[in-house]
Image (cartoon, helix red, strand yellow):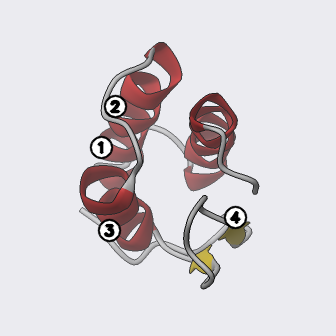
Amino acid sequence: MDWDATSAFAPVGLALRGQSVHRIVRTLGDAAYMLLKDWPTDDGEEYVTAVKACVDAISGKIAPEQFRVAFLRAADEAGITA
């Protein structure tokens, strides 16, 4: 497992509603933490897809960039500006 994989993973800046601080997700570990601890909602089809894609990327089943696409879709679904 590669929690800190950064190859082919372009950083994602996020602006969460109600928070003045922006977040930058640089690694799969950052993304996992964000999805599980700081995400505004824990339902939605794109959210579930992003969580699964994160696990798959950490375990090497998919490329980190493939996860990034799922992560951006989940952010859009949740109303998070990326």
Residue 3, percent from left and from top: 31, 70
CA separation in Å, label 4 and label 3 = 13 Å
> Residue 72's spot in the image, x, y percent?
68, 43
Mark 2 residue element: helix
User: What amino acid is found at the position of numbered circle 1 in the picture?
Assistant: Val
The residue most toward the front is 18
Quickly name the residue at label 2: 52
Q: Nearer the viewer, mark 2 or mark 4?
A: 2
Residue 44, given in percent of the width and then of the height, sits at: 43, 19
Indicate which disc, 2 or 4, sits on the residue closer to the N terminus. 4
CB within 8 Å, label 1 to label 2: yes
**Residue under label 1:** 55
Nearer the viewer's eye, disc 3 or disc 2?
A: 2
Residue kind at label 2, given as amino acid type: Lys
Q: Is residue 71 left or right of residue 43?
A: right
Q: Which residue is mark 4?
A: 8
Nearer-the-camera pick, 26 or 20: 20
Residue depicted at x 41% and y 72%? 30
Residue that appears at 37% across and 25% down: 48
* Residue 32 found in image quarter: bottom left
Helix, strand or loop at mark 1: helix
Going by the picture, which residue comes out furthest to the top?
45
Which quarter shows the C terminus? bottom right
Residue 79, given in percent of the width and then of the height, sits at: 66, 39
* Residue drawn at (70%, 64%) of the image: 8
Dot placed on the residue nearer the N-terminal end, 4 or 1 = 4
Q: Report the amino acid beneath label 4.
A: Ala
Q: Is residue 18 above or below residue 22?
A: above
Spatial CA distance of label 1 from label 2 is 5 Å
- Judging by the rendered image, the residue that carries numbered circle 3 is 2
